[in-house]
Image (spheres, helix red, strand yellow):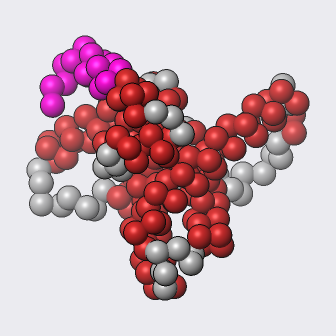
Amino acid sequence: MASDLELSDFLKSVERRAFKRSVYHVRNEQAALDIVQDSMMKLSEHYGHKPVEELPMLFQRILSNCTLDWFRRQKTQNALFSNMSDFESDGDDGEFDLLETLNASSNADQNESAEIQTDRAQTLHIIELEIQQLPARQREAFLLRYWEDMDVAETAATMGCSQGSVKTHCSRAVHSLSKALKGKGISL
């Protein structure tokens, strides 16, 4: 059984990667943050008593389900309100400041030259954009396999599909990414 400290340590260890994965899926940072927080709360409330070894798979499944729920809510909301701007407030209190976020994360690699840092940042940005262009299931399989380092069986269990489907989705995603990156002159 996981202690409170073990559960807290686990959640801290997966927080950033889960957020990044969610941003890739929903393409909205605020929604991604909500999804990750909801997933963490559900894990804590309903599965905090489970052994530590079971937490990664449980969390990934909860995260996937929360992401699907978000898409369902968006679909319903878009069907009800064709023009959401009519219902938004004019206040700009809750705006996200991209420059603050970029400035805070830019201090990580101070020992490298500016040219290397710029090249790396541009390459990563292009890769992120190409990942976002993948179809949803391919993107999910790719991120689970290569971002979360899950094996085929774990990915299949998380996605709720067969291992063959996971292999197909991953193969197609890698092929698409490779083709897109080569087209932009990037070879990894």
Q: Residue at x 49, y 24 (%)?
A: 135
* Quadrant in which the C terminus appears: top left
- Horizontal side of residue 135 vs 170, given as left or right: right
Q: Residue at x 39, y 28 (%)?
A: 164
Q: Looking at the picture, tell me which residue is in the foreground, 188 or 146.
A: 146
State the image coordinates of residue 131 (x, y, percent, origin top left).
39, 31
- Horizontal side of residue 9 vs 61, given as left or right: left
- Horizontal side of residue 79 vs 176, given as left or right: right
State the image coordinates of residue 87 (x, y, percent, origin top left).
87, 39
Report which quarter residue 187 is drawn in: top left
Determine if residue 130 is in view. Answer: no
Q: Where does the magenta region start and end?
A: 170-188
- Horizontal side of residue 42 vs 20, given as left or right: right
State the image coordinates of residue 139 (x, y, percent, origin top left).
44, 32
Q: Residue at x 49, y 85 (%)?
A: 3
Determine if residue 22 is in view. Answer: yes
Q: Looking at the picture, tell me which residue is in the foreground, 87 or 100.
A: 87
Report which quarter residue 53 is drawn in: bottom left
